[in-house]
């Protein structure tokens, strides 16, 4: 984190020296960069299980509509929650989100009209590459 802050200060300083931004703008830019970095670090990854009968039979148009609804709710909610992707099975949809809390996951579901049967925080990720490490 310290190296990142030093790099951010260097970049903002260069902008200041080249006359691109004044001292006040420099402080605003630096503050926003630090805040964005902290927000990204506080977000955890969650797996959401949604029981949706016949989910595997939803049409491409229906899935598009669901995706659009989810994205519009996320846009309305602002920062602190991000949808990464989802997996559709016969009767369930498993969604992977980054969020600051489970409460934001549940708020998103409520606003979008999506079921939430369970929310699990992911502790780590493994793959075939893990066997080679």
Image (cartoon, grey):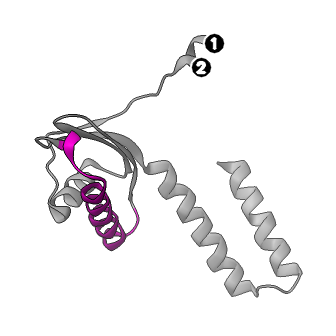
Q: Secondary structure at mark 1?
A: helix
* Left/right of residue 108 with respect to residue 132 in the rendered view: left
Residue located farthest toward the top when viewing the structure as drawn: 131
Q: Residues within 10 Å of mark 2 (few under 14, many from 20)?
A: few
Above or below, 47 against 38 in this view is above
Q: Pointer 1: what residue?
A: 132
Q: Are marks 2 and 1 in contact (CB under 8 Å)?
A: yes
- The residue sitting at 75% across, 57% down in the picture is 6
Near-viewer residue (42 or 69): 69
Residue 53 appears in which quarter of the rendering?
top left
Q: What is the distance, in whole Å, between disc 2 and disc 1 at their CAs?
A: 5 Å
Above or below, 29 against 48 in this view is below
Indicate yes or no whether the magenta region holds residue 29. Answer: no
- The residue sitting at 28% across, 54% down in the picture is 63
Q: Residues within 10 Å of mark 1 (few under 14, many from 20)?
A: few
Where does the image place residue 73, in percent across and percent down from the top left?
A: 28, 67
Q: Main secondary structure of the magenta part?
A: helix
Residue located farthest toward the left when viewing the structure as drawn: 53
- The residue sitting at 79% across, 67% down in the picture is 11
* Left/right of residue 97 with respect to residue 27 in the rendered view: left
- The residue sitting at 22% across, 40% down in the picture is 56
For the magenta stretch, what is the residue range? 55-79
Which numbered marker is on residue 129?
2
Q: Count of labels shown?
A: 2
Near-viewer residue (125 or 52): 52
**Residue 49 shows in this picture:** no
Q: Secondary structure at mark 2?
A: helix
């Amino acid at each position: 984190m310290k190296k990142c802050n030093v790099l951010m200060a260097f970049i903002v300083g260069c902008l200041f020296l080249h006359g691109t931004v004044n001292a006040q703008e420099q402080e605003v830019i630096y503050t926003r960069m630090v805040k964005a970095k902290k927000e990204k670090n506080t977000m955890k990854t969650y797996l959401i299980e949604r029981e949706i009968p016949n989910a595997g039979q939803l049409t491409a148009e229906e899935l598009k509509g669901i995706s659009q609804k989810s994205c519009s709710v996320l846009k309305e909610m602002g920062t602190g929650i991000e949808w990464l992707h989802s997996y559709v099975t016969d009767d369930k949809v498993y969604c992977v989100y980054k969020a600051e809390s489970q409460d934001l996951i549940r708020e998103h579901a409520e606003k979008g009209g999506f079921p939430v049967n369970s929310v699990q925080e992911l502790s780590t990720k493994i793959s075939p590459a893990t066997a080679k490490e």
